[in-house]
Amino acid sequence: MAEVDVNRLKWKILEIVQKFFEKHFSENAPDLEKRFTRQYDSLLRQYESENPSERSRVHHLIKEFKPALSSVIEPGENFDRLLGEVSPVLNAALSRAEQSNIQASIRTQESSKPHSIPKDRVYASYDQPENLNLVSVGIDIGSSTSHLVFSRLALKRERSFLNPSNRFILTDRELIYESEIIFTPLLNRTTIDIEAIVEFCKEEYKKAGITPEMVETGAVIVTGETAKKANAAEIVKRLSSESGKFVSAAAGPNYESILGAMGSGIVALSSETNRTILHADIGGGTSNLAIASNGNVLTTSCINVGGRLLGIDSGFKIWRIDEPTNFVMNELGMEYKIGDIIPEDDVRSIAREYAQALVEVMSGPARSRIAKELMMTEDLDFSRPIDEFSFSGGVAEIYYGSEETFDDIGRYLAEEIKGLVDELGLPIIKPENLIRATVIGAGAFTLSVSGSTCYFDKSIEFPISNIPIIPVNVTKENYSSDIVKKEIKRAFTKFDMKEGEDLIGLYFKDSLYRSYSWLQEFVRAIENSLPKSVSSKKMIILLFESDIGKMVGLMIRRETSIQHNLICLDELFLEEGDWIDIGAPLSSGQVFPVTVKSLVFNQNKEYS
């Protein structure tokens, strides 16, 4: 097989780009081509000192194409179309480069070990995918209702221009069972009835014909006002431990906003339409907001607006009052308590205040006293114009036409929101999923998968749960062994963690790898930075965005005294404030399921 001519490949790429710009950008084409070429060359020059192999140079051409292109045209229809034109050329080059490398290895092995490898062995090209299928559960314990769903997740590993790292990509989510929806059982105003929830889940597993042993991933999340209950953490811990092999316990208003937007289908829709959509999941206790664009969630927020914050029966007798409603009633000069009969006009006045607060924060930052007091998080970032708005959650069912009522103010809230939206002329669309949006998000969108170049000590027991992520500020620009030690110490201090005592994940975001000698220096710096962990044989978890996990792990074993209790995962995209769970390796130990989550339980707040 002929080796790849890297220079010819590069000129072929530039030729495709030039013709595309001329066809789609007319008079701007020469400037765009010049800027792209300059940026592409600049990005490729960073590898010159490595004296890379031909195979590595092909990888560099692929890796830096999208960053160079995004510097001259915005992601969107033309961006995706150009990727589609370049993709076949780069995929073919990838396959040739890899097979050439494999055959070189075969020749070396055959020369030293005759007949050790069959002559007719077939080697997979990048066009041959490997598939994984997982059963996932999502369990949502909400302010009004609780329910669960089972999904089948399909993961495919296909080496290509769009996936040069050989990692598994989640390609399909199939909903295979939806449970009944029950009112969340409470023992009293502050306590969830855990046994009733557990029994409900067991019955739904039986109805679905699924056992916990069959469930390989998923998440349990408590949402809205339920996340403020005294035993909220206990319920998610109990359910996650009894629901399957790798089912994570999660909580947090911003995290819930992401799951609601993804589970509703709005995030995927934003990718298909290239529209920026503001989505509000309106539940029983909170409304979770997210702005999605081009398939990504850009910003999230949460406000205490929900249909279950005031419970009234058909005769307008109050059976539930949550703290946000006490605050709103006080602002309106009302005084009601549980057991009172409240006039319908007052019910509507309360619902109107909630609706005004919600629409206010959907249109910009909270300005009024009521909206500011009801906010659970920071405001949304409105730096990008909004094209469309959408709703999900139980109140959204009523907004879009359902006639159901739930002995609360949900119907009044939906009507008031609709009146304000119509008055403002906001462009509203209806998402694919409404009341089940968050639970679908928990079951189908919480799973991440590591890269396939990871390292782990096989004596480690999985899953490893609730690992706080601590980013380490080490970059190519500031790198030295002393900086590694200094920044790891600073990271522990910043997060009030103690080295040698707390189990954490040290995360290196920058692509640091330079050479073999660099790797030796880096792993020794890691050892010197973690003296107490090393001496006490505390588990060491190293996480990387670039695909160097296995190299780092093997070099640590070779060059340091760290011989056990080590795990190095790569190709993970994490942020400060994230927590992760790591499941047992999949695909013969090649990759790890990882849940990136929040564990910030909602707190009761004092209203001024």
Image (cartoon, rainbow, N blue to C red):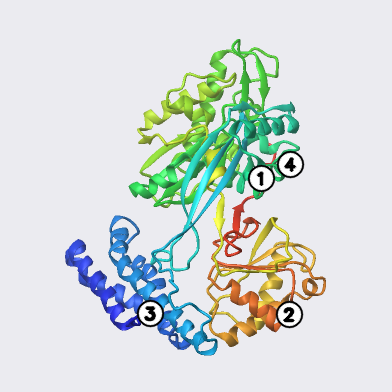
Q: Quadrant of the C terminus?
A: top right
- The residue carrying mark 3 is 42
User: In this rendering, would 26 be left or right of 222?
Assistant: left
Q: Look at label 4 and name its amino acid.
A: Arg
As rendered, which of 83 and 114 lies closer to the eye? Answer: 114
Instruction: Indicate which disc, 4 or 2, sits on the residue closer to the N terminus.
Output: 4
The image shows residue 500 at horizontal and vertical percentages of 79, 68
Measure the C-alpha gap from mark 2 to mark 1: 42 Å
Q: Is residue 377 visible?
A: no
Measure the C-alpha gap from mark 3 to mark 1: 51 Å
Measure the C-alpha gap from mark 4 to mark 1: 16 Å
Q: Quadrant of the N terminus?
A: bottom left
Instruction: Indicate which disc, 3 or 1, sits on the residue closer to the N terminus.
Output: 3
**Residue located 54% across and 19% down the image:** 405
Q: Secondary structure at mark 3?
A: helix
- The dot on residue 213 is 1
Q: Secondary structure at mark 2?
A: helix
Quadrant for residue 593, please give it. bottom right
- The residue carrying mark 2 is 528
Q: Look at label 3 and name its amino acid.
A: Ser
The image shows residue 357 at horizontal and vertical percentages of 52, 34
- The dot on residue 238 is 4
Instruction: Indicate which disc, 3 or 2, sits on the residue closer to the N terminus.
Output: 3
User: In this rendering, would 336 be left or right of 587?
Assistant: right
Q: Secondary structure at mark 1?
A: helix
Farthest-out residue, top: 315
Q: Look at label 2 and name its amino acid.
A: Asn
**Residue located 32% across and 63% down the image:** 83
Q: Which dot, 4 or 1, sits closer to the camera? A: 1
Q: Which dot, 4 or 3, sits closer to the camera? A: 4
